[in-house]
Image (cartoon, rainbow, N blue to C red):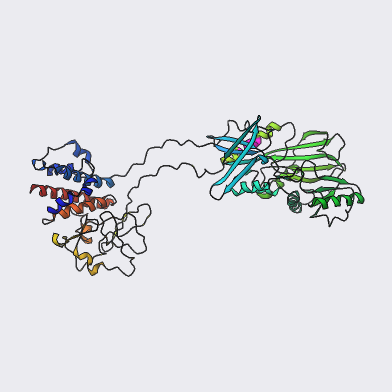
Amino acid sequence: MNFLRRRLSDSSFVANLPNGYMTDLQRPDSSTSSPASPATERRHPQPLAASFSSPGSSLFSSFSSAMKQTSQAPLGPMEPPGPSTPVVQRPRILLVIDDAHTDWAKYFHGKKVNGEIEIRVEQAEFSELNLAAYVTGGCMVDMQVVRNGTKVVRSFKPDFILVRQHAYSMALGEDYRSLVIGLQYGGLPAVNSLYSVYNFCSKPWVFSQLIKIFHSLGPEKFPLVEQTFFPNHKPMLTAPHFPVVVKLGHAHAGMGKIKVENQHDYQDITSMVAMAKTYATTEAFVDSKYDIRIQKIGSNYKAYMRTSISGNWKANTGSAMLEQVAMTERYRLWVDSCSEMFGGLDICAVKAVHSKDGRDYIIEVMDSSMPLIGEHLEEDKQLMADLVVSKMSQLPMPGGAVPLPLRPWTPQTKPAKPPGQAQLGPPLGQPQPRTPTQGGPRQAQSPQPPRSGSPSQQRLSPQGQQPLSPSSGSPQQQRSPGSPQLSRTSGGSSPNQVSKPGTTLTSQPRPPMQGRSTSQQGEESKKPATPHPHLNKSQSLTNSLSTSDASQRGTPSEDEAKAETIRNLRKSFASLFSD
């Protein structure tokens, strides 16, 4: 009794108890019922006994209520939380790299990713962009553009990129390959892919892919123009026949192309290649009747025929007449074969010339930066916008999305163990059980009595909440050959628990029920246990803490024993205050 008073007078222990605990102790014995029916007990409050008029009675009542609440926690399955409020998704940022002649924002107006996420369009040219790419932080793009005479400066992290501009051109002195590298470094998806955009920064490199297709399909199905590559001017001694077309370096829109009629002119061009310090290609001149262009945007195909009116040998220079022609299977084979290079081209076009002798020659392939021609410009732009939205919808959700709330932990049922083995506690976060028996498995030849010793022989654990019997230091506590070392637990559990071999320690192990052997714990589920007549009252109070903690993580097979323990504890308190 003195120990109990000293224990409950501790200010740190009392301060951790909420108001209203242990009200069940103020009711007579006849009102005790199963812990699974707390609502029934609350409907029939009993008058307070005269013996509880002391100031400590409310504290004892609070303690009994705390034990009752903890014992009732695992008896019913915890219901899952209600549906959470919908999380508003941030808009996806689309960076369109193109000049200001086309306002791409209007083509994406009203379009949503997966039908629910808005799309914010940011448009700029390569010359107006800068960036910083990180391993884990993605890519941060800085944009400085002039809109209606006003300089606009913004920084953002794009989610997708549409490339509609050439990243490299020797003729204009534009080299933005470093920006393409940065965007690829940041792991940004794009149309076309940044891998293909970088590979298209060298026309001879792209032509090498056409050579592979030529060898695969043959000259009949894939008629490729004859071309020769020179890394510098030194090998350019002469051409096999004239006239020839010399192409210098990497340029677009007919720039860097020269028609050479004879050997003398060819030598002059060779000196120009030496000054340019770049590579060059030569190909036989084809006296064309018209040019052919077959374009593919997603799954949409179009074929055009362009005839020069001004008489220039370059059909894309000067005046020309453009008309759409029927898409034949031959043209479809050309563009489909070219769309497979560099991992796949979502937008591409094949250029060919039709000679006056009726033969076709494929001369070039273009990527997503191709210029749009014909009467269906608006339709082609809309097709590109739909293709981009479709690609964005196929992407996984970004890592910055708000996760769903965590579900509460529910106890899991473990299969029954043989009497000679220790029972495993339920997993908490990770399935890492440990044995709850104190001092290891007990020997069947020398069972321990229910009492762990007289009060004078008991000593408190370092937490001061659970007494330790002298037998805890006996040789029976020695580890088995395969057992890991003993670990000290927290929160009222015994510091001499042994973990099962092959398992790791959990953060909150289940403490054992003090004062009972392993065989007696297995029998409690079969017959009701009666309180020991000489059970120490202070030990009963301390053991109830461990019992309530264990009941939070117990299995359904132990419910009867726990309920009986609670009833015995109430009777012990009743006899305590009846004195």
Q: Which is more toward the observer, 123 or 322? A: 123
Is most of the magenta stretch helix, strand or loop? helix
Residue at 86% of width from left, 49% of height from top? 269
Question: In the image, which residues are magenta?
Answer: 383-388
Position in image of residue 293 (x %, y %): 76, 40
The vertical placement of 318 against 175, above or below, is above
* Residue 555 falls left or right of residue 188: left
| Residue 469 lies within the magenta run | no
Q: Is residue 62 visible?
A: yes
**Looking at the rendering, which quadrant does residue 126 occupy?**
top right
The vertical placement of 143 against 543, above or below, is above
**Looking at the rendering, which quadrant does residue 515 occupy?**
bottom left
Residue at 20% of width from left, 38% of height from top? 42
* Residue 411 falls left or right of residue 388: left
* Residue 371 falls left or right of residue 419: right
Residue at 84% of width from left, 57% of height from top? 235
Position in image of residue 33 (x %, y %): 18, 44
Q: Is residue 187 visible?
A: no
- The single residue placed furthest to the top in the displayed view is 148
Position in image of residue 471 (x %, y %): 20, 65
**Looking at the rendering, which quadrant does residue 162 occupy?**
top right
Residue at 12% of width from left, 39% of height from top? 48
Position in image of residue 520 (x %, y %): 20, 59
Total labels drawn: 0
Q: Which is more toward the observer, 168 or 195? A: 168
